[in-house]
Amino acid sequence: MIIVRCTRRFHAAMLADLRRPHEFAYERVGWVFAKQARAKSDVLLLPVEYVPVEDANYIRSARAAACFDTQTIRGALQHARNSGLSCLQVHLDDHAGDTDFSDTDIETIDALAASLRVVAPNTAHGGLVLSQASGTARVWWTDLALPAAAQVSIVGFPTRFGPPHP
C-alpha cells in the first residue's frame, strides 16, 4: 500500500492556498513534492514542499475547472528530476466529506505520471485530491503497470485517514 502522510500544518497551508480565488479558474492547482520510504510492501510518501501554480500560468478552458500551461508542467518535471522527490499534482474539492477523482482528473494525472516516471523513474508520482479534512491519492509506483491503492493520512490532532483509492 502507498500512504501519503502529511502534517496538519502542511495540509492547512495547502488548503489556504488552494482556496484563493482566481480571476477565471474555478479551482487552484499545486504540486506536492514528497520524500519516500519503503517498508516491506508499503511505500510512505512524506510531503516536504508545496508549490502552487502561479496565477499567470492558468489558461482558460471550457473542459476543466483549472487548466495550466506547459511551462508549469515542465517546472514540475524538472523539480522532480533534480530533487529526486515524488511529485503529486493536487487540487481541492472544498466540502466536508470524502472526495474522489473525476474522469478528467484521472486522464490528466495518468498522463502527467507517465512523464514523471520517465524523468524521475525511481519515485512514486501521481495526484492528490483534498477535501476539508480528508483526501485521496492516485499514485504510480515505479514497478507497477497500474496506479496503486493510496491512503492519505493527515497527522496531528485530530488524526484523520482517507480511504484507499484504487
Image (tube, helix red, strand yellow):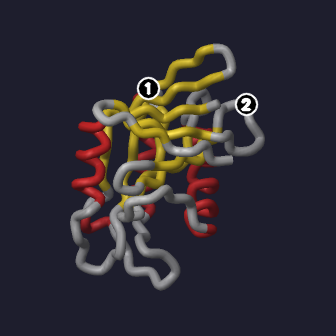
Give residue 140's position: percent from left, percent from top: 64, 40
Give residue 23's position: percent from left, percent from top: 24, 78
Residue 74 or residue 49, whichever sits in front: 49
State the residue lying farthest toward the right.
Answer: 145
Quadrant location of the N terminus in the rendered image: top right
Pointer 2 residue: 143
Q: Quadrant of residue 80?
A: top left
Q: Quadrant of residue 24?
A: bottom left
- What amino acid is found at the position of numbered circle 1 in the picture? Lys
Q: Residues within 10 Å of mark 2 (few under 14, many from 20)?
A: few
Give residue 88's position: percent from left, percent from top: 47, 45
- What amino acid is found at the position of numbered circle 2 in the picture? Asp
Give me the residue at 68% from left, 21% from top: 41
Q: Residues within 10 Å of mark 1 (few under 14, many from 20)?
A: some
Q: CA distance from mark 1 to mark 2?
A: 18 Å
Pointer 1 residue: 35
Q: Is residue 80 above or below residue 39?
A: below
